[in-house]
Image (cartoon, grey):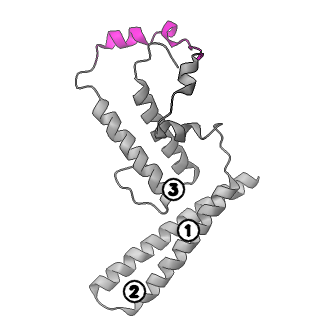
Amino acid sequence: MFRNEPRCERCRENEGIIDDAKRFLGMYGLRPLGGTLQSDDDEEREYRVTAREARRVLNEIRMDVLPDAAAVRKAIRPRAATVVADTSPARASRPSSTGTATRVAAPVKTDTVDINTLQTRVLGLLDQLGSIDEQIKVAELAQGLPARARLSDLNKQKATVLRTLAALEKARIAASN
């Protein structure tokens, strides 16, 4: 913790949630955070939803009138950035919120990928790919404009899943080296 830091703990916590989501999406080579929640699996969707909620909270907290720039500079001078030791036992026993628990779950920042996590994601995506292939077979039999639109959507979904699988394979190869 930093003394006289210009952001509140709630803001830092929400920024941490957004950073975790960006790190997760970047690690697996997924589409960056944005306006849509479209995702290939439940875990990715969960990260996108929590990041959207954190962004909404940050936007609500944002001040209408910004503080004086001189006051902000004074508050963040090097003397104010000294680290405060977290020695109070009351803090350690305080129940943590769900956002903090998610962030604390990662004990060490690392660029390595958990092979078991990769494997479960790949298996889920392969199941999804099989389902999409079955839907494509059914859509190819139908005729008309709606059927062609549905077929186009299914082919786009299939391409997205294949790109994600390729990114996961790339991450697996990088992790094994």
Seen from the viewer's position, the closer of residues 51 and 66 is 51
Q: Earlier in the sequence, mark 2 or mark 3?
A: 3
- Which residue is denoted by mark 3 in the rendering? 43
Q: Position of residue 5 (x, y in %)?
A: 44, 17
Spatial separation of the CA atoms under disc 1 and disc 3: 12 Å
Q: Residue at x 50, y 36 (%)?
A: 100
Amino acid at the residue labelled 1: Leu
Mark 1 vs mark 3: give the one in front: 3
Q: In the rendered image of this protein, does residue 167 appear above or below residue 14? A: below
Which residue was labeled with disc 1?
125
Q: Position of residue 46 (x, y in %)?
A: 46, 53
Q: Residues within 10 Å of mark 3 (few under 14, many from 20)?
A: few
Residue of label 2? 139
Q: Is residue 62 above or below residue 128?
A: above
The furthest residue to the left: 64
Foreground tag (2 vs 1):
1
Please indicate, yes or no, whether residue 71 appears anywhere in the rendered image.
yes
The image shows residue 91, relative to residue 23, as above or below, that is above
| 29 horizontally vs 156: left or right | right
Mark 2 is on which residue type?
A: Ala
- Identify the secondary structure beneath mark 3: helix
Residue 67, how many percent across, how many down?
Answer: 28, 16
